[in-house]
Image: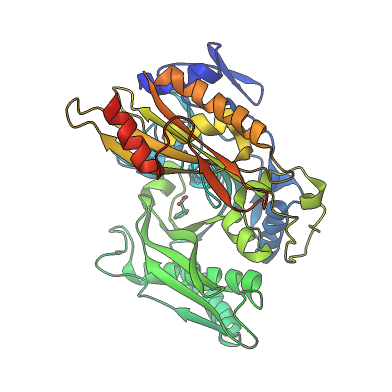
Amino acid sequence: MARCLLLSRTSLPDEVVTVLGEQYPKDAKTNITSSILSKVSRKLHLQPSHPIGILRSLIEAHYPSFTALSNFSPVVTPAMNFDDLSFPLDHPGRSLTDSYYINAHRMLRTHTSAHEVETFAKGIRQWLLTADVYRRDEIDGSHYPVFHQMEGARIFSHDPSGIRELEEDNARLAARLAKANIVIEDIPHVTATNPAQPSHDPRHAELVALNLKLSLNSLILDIFGGRANAGEGEPLRVRWIEAYFPFTSPSFEVEVMFGGKWLEILGCGVVLQSTLDKAKVPNSIGWAFGLGLERIAMILYSIPDIRLFWSEDPRFLSQFTPGQIKTFKPFSKYPACYKDVSFWLPDQAMHENDFCDLVRDAAGDFVEDVKLVDAFTHPKTKRNSQCFRINYRSMDRSLSNDEANALHAQVVSRLKNVCVYLLVRVDHVRTTSNTIIKPRLLHLAVSPVTLAHGRAALEE
Ligand code: PHE
């Protein structure tokens, strides 16, 4: 905890955090960084010509009778994000290393399910909710600490009229899918390991799970059909997998075959009765799903790096048109420049996500990825050191080695605030071909890096 306090103090010296114009007092749980705060107001899902906004509209158009919601504040209570959804107290998602806390009482939502109770409580029985969500994570081409989810939910009455509505909808959706060029690998709707809830009639729970599956298969057909790089006449392939979420049972994940690989695109299940009880919705049963919009947009538009969604470069933004999905044409890929940094871990240890946030806060979207390349324990003192490789690359221009050095110096300077002593810096430069990178060791003329790292630690 002390460590996280220290990390946030380096970037936000004041005693309050301001999020969307509201001020919140900091406390020992505060771990939100200024780089994350700068993203909160962007609201990519509300921009009609942004790929995330376009995808939102396409999915909303698929569910014309659902209420579309997209203006919920990302600031929620831990109760909304976790407790109301029956997350156990020791669930890892609650930890400071996984989530961004404004203070002990407020956090940035980690998923759109955080709004299930309040939305059901409004009496809305079928809805779609799109929002930005925040998770502390590693840094690479497909992970970004802010992304967008769309939550969909539908509840039916527990009485014969609800059963009839389900049966009719299931027949309609099944007939549509039967005619389509789609191959679905299914699993049983309800099993001993993926059970119906005790308060549910198992037959009714089966009908709801079937409705969820048909409804999502039909959405997937709409957005991926003919676009999955499967080859001329090849069917779209979808597979259902048993899953676990604290707030649904049975629960499932869905994968789509795209370009020869299975890609997970969503999680879903039958809503836990306790969630509906919290929302004071009597006599109802239903389903919910949550899908990751960046994941789907990267696949559909062939967008190679998740950082591009945050680009304000007209060469990116001008390629998208509302209502249309066409392949993104990458503008030239600018050269990367990687630099290593090694350091003794602070006494309280440092989680990799803490390091990634520190790097992101210092160097922003110039960081393409961060990899742990070596870890070392001193045989006598038992102190631990780690060596990380940070890959710097700009998405819209060529970054000079001097600029990369300046960014790296920022990282090193912030590290000095949390680590007692920095071991050795290993610098790398580009060759003139702009693609091959050659190591130039500043401190020790030893290669490879891992060896340099270990030796330096021993020479301490
Ligand atoms: N909220 C879950 C996630 O972020 C997805 C989900 C939504 C699962 C609704 C079940 C029901 O992973």
Above or below for 155 versus 380? below
- Looking at the rendered image, the quarter that the C terminus falls into is top left
Can residue 128 be spotted in the picture?
yes
Q: How many marks?
A: 0
Q: Quadrant of residue 175?
A: bottom right
Where residue 409 sits: x, y (%)?
A: 56, 25
Pick the front one: 403 or 120: 403
Can residue 98 be spotted in the picture?
no
Where residue 91 sits: x, y (%)?
A: 32, 41
Q: Residue at x 44, y 67 (%)?
A: 208
Where residue 374 sits: x, y (%)?
A: 35, 42
Q: Residue at x 73, y 65 (%)?
A: 325
Above or below for 171 versus 91? below
In this picture, residue 88 sits left or right of residue 418: left
Above or below for 424 versus 447? above
Rendering colour mode = rainbow
Q: Residue at x 62, y 71 (%)?
A: 224
- Looking at the rendered image, the quarter that the N terminus falls into is top left
Pick the front one: 119 or 257: 257
Pick the front one: 352 or 399: 399
In this picture, residue 358 sits left or right of residue 63: left
Where residue 174 sits: x, y (%)?
A: 54, 81
Q: Residue furthest front?
A: 445
Q: Residue furthest left?
A: 380
Above or below for 338 versus 333? above
In this picture, residue 46 sits left or right of residue 162: right
